[in-house]
Image: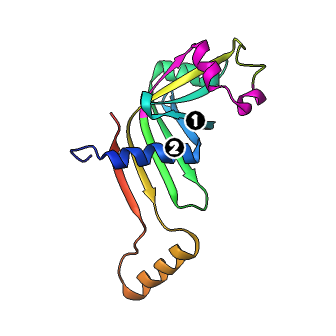
Amino acid sequence: MTGSVDKDDVARVWKLIDDIDVCMFTSHDGAKLRSRPMSSHARQSENAIYFLTDVEGHKDQEVAANSEVVLSYAKPGSGKFLAVTGRARVLDDRVLIKDLWDKDAEAFWEGADDPKVRVIEVVPDEAQFWEGPHGVVATVQMVIAAATAMPPVMGDQRKVDLR
């Protein structure tokens, strides 16, 4: 981890979360890790990433037993990847649930007042992003690197402190 916080990198992380939206939410299931895709609701002003979840799911118990989680974001074909580590907790905050409610949530619950709906709040500790060329540009760079015996220029990657 670098010593200082780069505000541009912090803003870049939050923008990547907004742009990609769906992540693989990884939590501890005892000694095992369990991942599942979830739609995130990022709020940089609150330093939190929120997820709507069901009280009957395993995530609630997993987060209660071990709050450390990893959120893995990737945008296919874009060359954009992001991993966020943080601490999670489950909330039964009806106002927040209504505020986060969207059309996607309607596929899973009767409405924002459904008593089974909960919120998982993740407060991020750090992130690492990778953004680089993709498609034809990446292929050309790989060919040039192979021909010149030089490593390819594959874009930016950095660790970012979000605390």
Q: Is residue 72 magenta?
A: no
Q: Position of residue 145 (x, y in %)?
A: 41, 81
Q: Is residue 46 left or right of residue 136?
A: left
Q: Residue furthest left?
A: 3
Residue type indicated by callout 2:
Ile
Q: Which residue is mark 2?
A: 17
Residue occupying the point 46% across, 45% down: 83
User: Quarter of the image holding residue 22?
Assistant: top right
The kind of secondary structure element at disc 2 is helix
Q: In the rendered structure, which disc, 1 or 2, sits on the residue that comes first in sequence?
A: 2
Q: Position of residue 5 (x, y in %)?
A: 27, 43
Residue type indicated by callout 1:
Ser
Find residue 40 and name its label.
1
Q: Position of residue 64 (x, y in %)?
A: 49, 18
Residue occupying the point 40% across, 48% down: 128
* Mark 1 Cα-neighbour bin, 10 Å: few <14, some 14–19, many ≥20: many
Q: Is residue 96 magenta?
A: yes
Find residue 139 and name its label.
none
Residue occupying the point 57% across, 42% down: 23
The kind of secondary structure element at disc 1 is loop
* Mark 2 Cα-neighbour bin, 10 Å: few <14, some 14–19, many ≥20: many
Q: CA distance from mark 1 to mark 2?
A: 8 Å
- Tell me the magenta residue range: 86-108
